[in-house]
Each structure stands twice: as structure tokens, then as C-alpha cells.
Image (cartoon, rainbow, N blue to C red):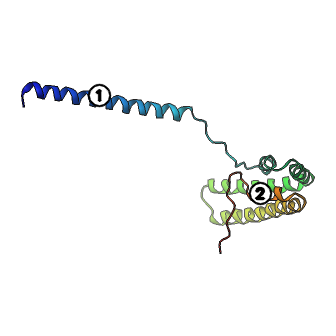
Amino acid sequence: MSVAHAVTMERGSSRWLLLGSLALNLFFVGVAIAMAVRAPAPSYWDRNVFVRVDRLAATLPAADADILRGEINAKRDAIADAQVAYHKAQDHIHEVLRQEPFDAEAMRAAMAKTRAARQTFDQTIQGVFAGIAASISPAGRQALANWPPGRKPVSDKR
């Protein structure tokens, strides 16, 4: 192999190396731009049950959505009271966790109050939804069963 042949091979290799490096850099710049530009996925979770009910109603047939909103509005005070009590109980747990010195018994008591408030809240909202489910169309019940949107129906697991 002559010296001229070795220099020619070295030049060709360095050109490919330069081209590969440029392509890799452009790829990383493209990924960085795509990550900066893309919008975050919308969240379907909200602590407020009334916000979640509005999102749910938007996925139902119009007549069923009206029934849902009407029943929720009719029971709004009871639902709101149960929700506020539950959220206050949750917040109390956070307060107990921040106390120094930490009191394990106070934490257990706060958790017991939260469980009771959660059960009351669940019974209230579930009672309303049981009545709603009996009043809406089969298509509306299917939409409730498949909430949130995009959830796949549970298959028969026998």
C-alpha cells in the first residue's frame, strides 16, 4: 500500500465520520426542539368532584348528560359537604405530619377521621350515581363504565 493510497483512505474515513457526527447532532437538536414544543397531555384528574362530573358529562349522550347534571345539582349541597369534610380530613393529615415532635397517635386519629370522611363521601356520590345509572340510556351506562375515555372494557375473565 502506498502513502498516497493511505492518505486517500484516511480522507474518506474522516468525511464519513464528519457526516455521521453532523447527522447525530441534527438528530439531537431535533429531539430537543420536539421536546420543547410539544404540549403536555391534559390531566383528567381533579380533586374537585364537580370538575370530574363535568368532564364525565361531556362524554355522555346529550340527554344522559342533562340527567347527570340535574341529579348532581339536586344533590349538590350534600355532595359538597361530604367533599369538604373529606378534603379537610386529608389536609389535617398533612398538618399532623408537619408537627414537631411527631405524634403517631395523632396521625392514627387523623387517618381514622379521613377514612370515615372518605366513606361518607363515597356513599354520598355513589348513591347519586346509582340513581343516575338507573335513569340514563344503555349507551350512557356504557360510557360511565368505560370512564375515563379510552379505557378498554374489562373482558370476561373466566
Crowd around label 1: few <14 · some 14–19 · many ≥20 (10 Å): few
- Residue at the top extreme? 4
Query: Where in the figure is residue 88, as x and y percent of width and height?
Result: 76, 54
Mark 1 in CB contact with mark 2 (< 8 angstroms) = no
Query: Where in the figure is residue 74, as x and y percent of width and height?
Result: 93, 53
> Which residue is depicted at the point 73% across and 57% down?
146
| Quadrant where the image shows the N terminus | top left
- Looking at the rendered structure, the secondary structure element under dot 2 is helix
Q: Which residue matches tag 2?
A: 86
| Quadrant where the image shows the C terminus | bottom right
Q: Give the number of callouts.
A: 2
Q: Which residue matches tag 1?
A: 18
> Which residue is depicted at the point 65% across and 71% down?
157
> Which residue is depicted at the point 84% across and 52% down?
80
Crowd around label 2: few <14 · some 14–19 · many ≥20 (10 Å): many
Left or right of 133: which side holds 110?
Answer: left
Left or right of 99: which side holds 142?
Answer: right
Instruction: Report the amino acid beneath label 2.
Output: Tyr
Q: Is residue 55 above or below residue 119?
A: above
